[in-house]
Image: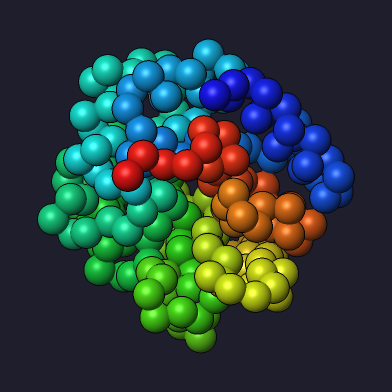
Amino acid sequence: MSVAKNIASVRERIARAGGNPDEITIVAVTKGFGPEVCHSALDAGLKVLGENRVQEALAKMEKVKGAEWHLIGHLQTNKVRVASGRFALIQSVDSRRIADALARINVEQKVLVEINVAREKRKTGVDPAEANNLINEVAEMLDLQGLMAMGPAEGEPTPAFRELRTLRDQAQQRLGRALPILSMGMSGDFEAAVAAGSTMLRLGEALFGPRPA
């Protein structure tokens, strides 16, 4: 596995999709991989590592130094205390309850609001119809940096990604300030996300190959 070659390929694909590889952050999703893969990502020039589970991330943080860690999976309320302050960005705030719990511990925590623009029951994220209210509430409680979403499991992802960008643009106007991060696009659909305006990609397989069983 050559992570450096895979990164170069991803950057070329970003450019072909109309994005600037220097302006789009790649979050290396290391869920299920050991510390050696985390080190390979850092050695290849990536700076941000993403984990789905708090406990798995905390264990790796002890062994992997020098990374910026993002929580990209669902955050349970019983994990808020140990997660707050340990992650540079929590991308998966999807309810007032989670936002309240985080704010009670650390109002400076940087977060994204996760929105279920795919409208799939198996996906986490606030319903798009309720997104504006949650965005407004989170912006008052925490350091809101933008929005996050997953594309649909099947079919064309572009409409979902465009909807997330529209929600972000509307929120910026409403709040009167920038929300610079649009975290959308994974290994199977990141080119569509880039074309729709993504500023942050969450990539695992595209960098490291299939995740271990």
Residue 184 visible? The answer is: yes
Residue 50 in sight in this render = no
Please state, as top left, top right, bottom left or bottom right, where the N terminus lies in the image: top right
Residue at x-position 13% and y-position 55%: 78
Which residue shows up at 37% across the image and 60% down it? 93
**Residue with the most extreme left position:** 78
Residue 98 lies, with reference to residue 23, above or below; the image says below
Colouring convention used in this rendered image of the protein: rainbow
Residue 2, compared with residue 105, is above or below; it is above
The residue depicted at 83 percent of the width and 50 percent of the height is: 17
Percent position of residue 213, x then y: 32, 44
Residue beneath the point at 79% across and 57% down: 195
In the image, residue 196 sits, relative to residue 82, either above or below, namely below
Q: Nearer the viewer, residue 122 or 48?
A: 122
Q: How many marks?
A: 0
Residue 160, position as x, y percentages in the image: 64, 73
Q: Is residue 153 left or right of residue 92?
A: right
Image position, residue 188 (x, y; %) = 61, 55
Percent from the top left, x then y, of residue 97? 25, 68
Residue extending farthest to the front is 213
Q: Give the camera-side residue of 65 and 3.
A: 3
